[in-house]
């Protein structure tokens, strides 16, 4: 008897593994096929709470994972792309969206899972266009997911007949133990869909007339625990994130705990007190099929909790802000702090999300580099050593290298060709940003040399350098705007400024040669003047390259 029992455990575990792998395949396929559209859909969750909920439902149904949706949402809050109010609506919708997978399982379509696998593998292997290959991968994942259900169904039937297993299930008739079992199992495997798959499958694998392996009461409390367990991953993802992200994660777990507490209490009172309506009895009377009953409890419970919280979303958002206020100590210099702001967590493994966050990180670094360049030019023109000390290229070097290491990890993920090219362009942009900061640092060193050696420049020379510096900083600012907004329409203006910088640099070099011939400028100052021209011209070149790379990327995306 021990042998068959061990075999059924292995088969059940293998089926669960296939289910989880199928979910991962579907998520990856949808990410490759429509990852950017999915992000845009999440970001369009406006202040309208109903729209935010609908977006959360649709996104979760699409990727078949409320955990992925909520982690993506927390990441967007951290990046400043969503506010707390929007995120709360999406989280409410995600909890509802995840119930549709249990409904699909209850329809028992696992019998045709091999057909989905066959169609999916044909499309994925033999389709020529990447779009159809990705669709094939999604269908293949869907088939693998339900094939996992099919693999589990037989062993679970056998397992339910084993006295030892039945005795374990009997211990969960205690509501608290059942709730804790759902919580712990879901927190460990980080998937409420997988827990529900086991629960629903356990109910529809019964032979006719055979009683369920567990009571509906036990299943109901396991479901309540499952909802709490799925929020743990979001809490972990928010640990290194911003205060606003932590508020969104806190709302997620509080929403689940409050919902489970309220409905758990109603269910328990209905079972123990005659005057309180028996909720479970209503479910048992409405749905005869045990599997459908479990799936419907999961769905209606989440819908009811969502409708309970939805009208009070704004007051709850205010409560979250009061429970987790932003203290002065929590307000770092977000611009110059030696810490990644948008790529400081490895829990988000959705390539398009990481790419979006990397873009925001690059925009931040470019803003720092541009400010350093502006400070350096002002310090040179004003001969101000104190202002020159504000330029710290080490910050940019630190941020570019940290960002580069994150991009290396991103490069190992499965990405569509367009995203892979975008990551390649980002590596080049990091180099350009580091060079701009290095040129700014060079300029500050000239300020120190001028002071230490008591060098002087003619007024017309300073005026020329000030004008060249103005053109360079203007180009750098336009490049930042174009890069940040991904606005290719600004590129002609940037290229025109770049030509002006090149032309003016040559003119200044000629003027410098004439001054040297007329001996109106100290040779040491002349060397600094020439180096200054080179640094400004090259800074303009790097700014132009950053914007041009963005244009090339946009053009390749249109093809």
Image (spheres, helix red, strand yellow):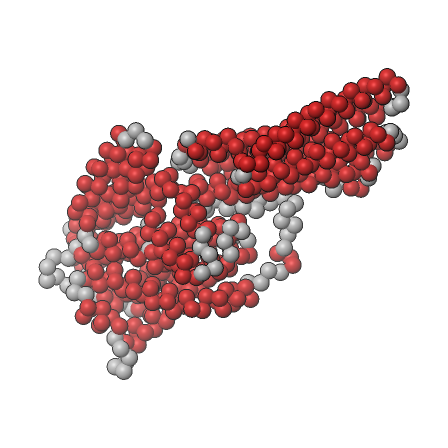
5 or 512: nearer the eye? 512
289 or 446: nearer the eye? 446
**Which residue occupies 64% across, 57% down?**
329
Quarter of the rendering containing residue 287: bottom left
Please provide percent x and percent y for residue 461. 82, 29
**Which residue occupies 16% across, 65% down?**
288
How many numbered marks have been drawn onto this rendered protein structure? Answer: 0
321 or 163: nearer the eye? 321
Please provide percent x and percent y for residue 485. 54, 42
In the rendered structure, the answer to whether residue 48 lies left or right of residue 169 reads right
Residue 412 visible (yes or no): no
In the rendered structure, the answer to whether residue 464 lies left or right of residue 190 reads right
In the rendered structure, the answer to whether residue 73 lies left or right of residue 215 reads right
347 or 286: nearer the eye? 286
**Which residue occupies 34% across, 49% down?**
62
From the image, which quarter does the C terminus lie in? top left
């Amino acid at each position: 008897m021990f042998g068959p029992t061990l075999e059924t455990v292995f088969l059940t575990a293998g089926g669960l593994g296939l289910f989880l792998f199928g979910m991962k395949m579907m998520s990856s396929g949808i990410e490759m096929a429509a990852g950017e559209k999915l992000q845009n859909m999440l970001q369009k969750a406006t202040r309208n709470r109903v729209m935010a909920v609908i977006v959360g439902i649709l996104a979760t149904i699409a990727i078949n994972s409320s955990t992925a949706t909520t982690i993506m949402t927390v990441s967007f809050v951290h990046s400043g792309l969503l506010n707390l109010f929007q995120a709360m609506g999406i989280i409410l919708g995600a909890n509802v969206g995840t119930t549709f997978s249990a409904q699909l399982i209850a329809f028992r379509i696992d019998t045709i899972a091999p057909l989905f696998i066959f169609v999916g593998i044909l499309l994925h292997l033999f389709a020529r266009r990447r779009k159809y290959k990705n669709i094939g991968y999604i269908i293949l994942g869907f088939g693998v997911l339900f094939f996992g259900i099919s693999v589990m169904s037989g062993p679970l039937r056998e397992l339910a007949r084993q006295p030892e297993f039945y005795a374990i299930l009997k211990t969960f008739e205690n509501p608290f133990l059942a709730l804790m079992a759902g919580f712990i199992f879901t927190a460990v495997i980080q998937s409420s869909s997988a827990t529900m798959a086991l629960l629903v499958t356990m109910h529809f694998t019964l032979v006719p007339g055979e009683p369920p392996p567990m009571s509906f009461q036990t299943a109901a409390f396991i479901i309540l625990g499952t909802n709490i367990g799925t929020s743990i991953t979001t809490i972990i993802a928010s640990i290194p994130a911003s205060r606003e992200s932590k508020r969104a994660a806190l709302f997620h777990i509080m929403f689940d705990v409050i919902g489970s507490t309220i409905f758990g209490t109603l269910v328990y009172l209905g079972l123990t007190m005659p005057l309180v309506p028996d909720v479970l009895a209503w479910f048992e009377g409405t749905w005869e099929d045990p599997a459908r009953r479990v799936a419907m409890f999961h769905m209606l419970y989440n819908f009811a909790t969502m409708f309970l919280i939805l009208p009070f979303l704004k007051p709850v958002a205010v409560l979250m802000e009061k429970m987790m206020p932003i203290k002065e100590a929590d307000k770092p210099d977000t611009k110059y702090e030696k810490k990644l702001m948008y790529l400081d967590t490895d829990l988000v493994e959705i390539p398009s999300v990481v790419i979006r966050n990397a873009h925001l990180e690059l925009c931040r670094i470019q803003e720092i580099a541009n400010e350093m360049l502006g400070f350096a030019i002002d310090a040179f023109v004003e001969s101000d050593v104190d202002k020159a000390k504000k330029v710290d290229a080490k910050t940019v070097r630190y941020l570019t290298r940290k960002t580069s290491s994150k991009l290396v990890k991103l490069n190992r993920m499965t990405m569509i060709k367009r995203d892979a090219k975008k990551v390649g362009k980002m590596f080049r942009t990091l180099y350009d940003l580091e060079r701009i900061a290095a040129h700014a640092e060079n300029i500050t060193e000239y300020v120190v040399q001028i002071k230490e050696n008591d060098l002087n420049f003619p007024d017309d020379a300073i005026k020329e350098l000030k004008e060249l510096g103005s053109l360079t900083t203007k180009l750098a600012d336009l490049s930042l705007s174009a890069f940040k907004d991904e606005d290719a329409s600004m590129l002609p203006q940037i290229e025109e400024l770049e030509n002006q910088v090149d032309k003016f640099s040559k003119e200044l070099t000629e003027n410098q040669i004439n001054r040297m011939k007329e001996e109106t400028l100290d040779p040491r100052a002349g060397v600094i003047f020439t180096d200054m021209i080179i640094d400004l011209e090259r800074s303009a070149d790097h700014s132009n390259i950053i914007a041009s790379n963005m244009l090339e990327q946009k053009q390749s995306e249109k093809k």
